[in-house]
Image (spheres, rainbow, N blue to C red):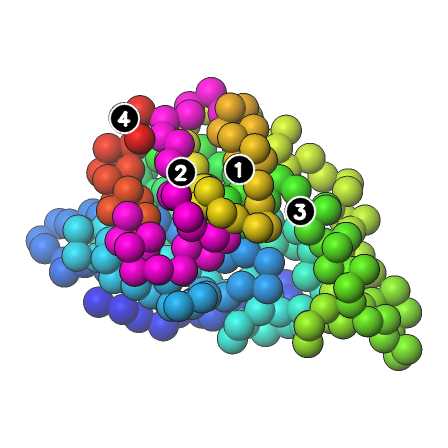
Amino acid sequence: MQESIELAVPRGILRGMVHRPPAGEGAHHPLLIVFHGFTGTKVDNHFIYPKLCRSLEARGIASLRFDFSGSGESDGDFRDMTLSGELDEARRIFDFAQGLAGIDPRSIFLLGHSMGGLVAGMLAAEKAPAGLVLLAPAGNIDAIISERLRAGRPLEDAPGCRDIGGLVLGREFLPDLRGMNPLGLSARYAGPVMVVQGSADPVVPEEVSRLWYSRFPGAARYIVLEGAGHNYDSIAFEERIFREIGDFVVAPRRSPA
């Protein structure tokens, strides 16, 4: 079952979707919370998140996915987006998830893609979820954003802001990012971690994902998809990722890749 939901946060309303398996009497399902990446949405490229959530639902796993403020259908302006702001919203999403009917609050998992991986990792260190899934965690986010800014166009009516392909990146983003330590904070999470990386990712190099994986005391699975790019854009890649994520939620401890 798929249901639209809303969550009030300081910047307005976050809009999302919750997926629940059929509810048997007294059922309490594990739940995966999905955090999209920079310029992403709760749907994302080739509708990967709805397809993932429906795949999990078929395995008895619930899921929750929101657009962060300024993205997708949520309130707010993208130019006000910062990493610390998304982390604060992620905290509120996690707390909201714990109160969902039919959910086992001791079996909440986090998933983050790219910059969403930074959010998920830092949140995991605070909230100690049952497991953490990182898809190409963007530990090189400073370099990624710096390149986008160089290629962007300055806005005359908004000093310090730049047009990066139809979205306005605000002047506070980089200072906010540089005031945080995503890897150092994330590495405090001691629970099980799975990292999925494409061998042909042009955005996040494999050495970045391997570094992140190596820093987690609960490192459990590291998976390289040969030929995959940053968005895992093929049916074969999707099917492998969906299967691996479902297996991890069912049995999050260390297993062969």
**What is the CA distance from the residue labelled 3 to the residue labelled 1?**
14 Å
Q: Position of residue 166 (x, y in %)?
A: 68, 76
- Mark 2 vs 1: CB contact within 8 A: yes
Which is nearer the N-term, disc 4 or disc 3?
3
Residue span colored magenta: 216-240
Three-letter code, disc 1: Glu
Pointer 2 local density, CA inside 10 Å: few below 14, some 14–19, many at least 20: some
Q: Quadrant of residue 255?
A: top left
Quarter of the image for the N terminus: give it. bottom left
Q: Name the residue under label 1.
A: 206
Q: Nearer the viewer, residue 167 or 130?
A: 167
**What is the CA distance from the residue labelled 1 to the residue labelled 4?**
20 Å
Q: Mark 2 points at which residue?
A: 224
Three-letter code, disc 4: Ser
**What is the CA distance from the residue labelled 2 to the residue labelled 4?**
14 Å
Q: Where is residue 31 in the image (x, y as percent from the top left)?
A: 31, 49
Q: Name the residue under label 4.
A: 255
Residue situated furthest bottom in the rendering = 157
**What is the CA distance from the residue labelled 2 to the residue labelled 1?**
9 Å
Which is nearer the N-term, disc 2 or disc 1?
1
Element type where label 2 sits in the image:
strand
Element type where label 1 sits in the image:
helix
Discs 3/1, front:
1
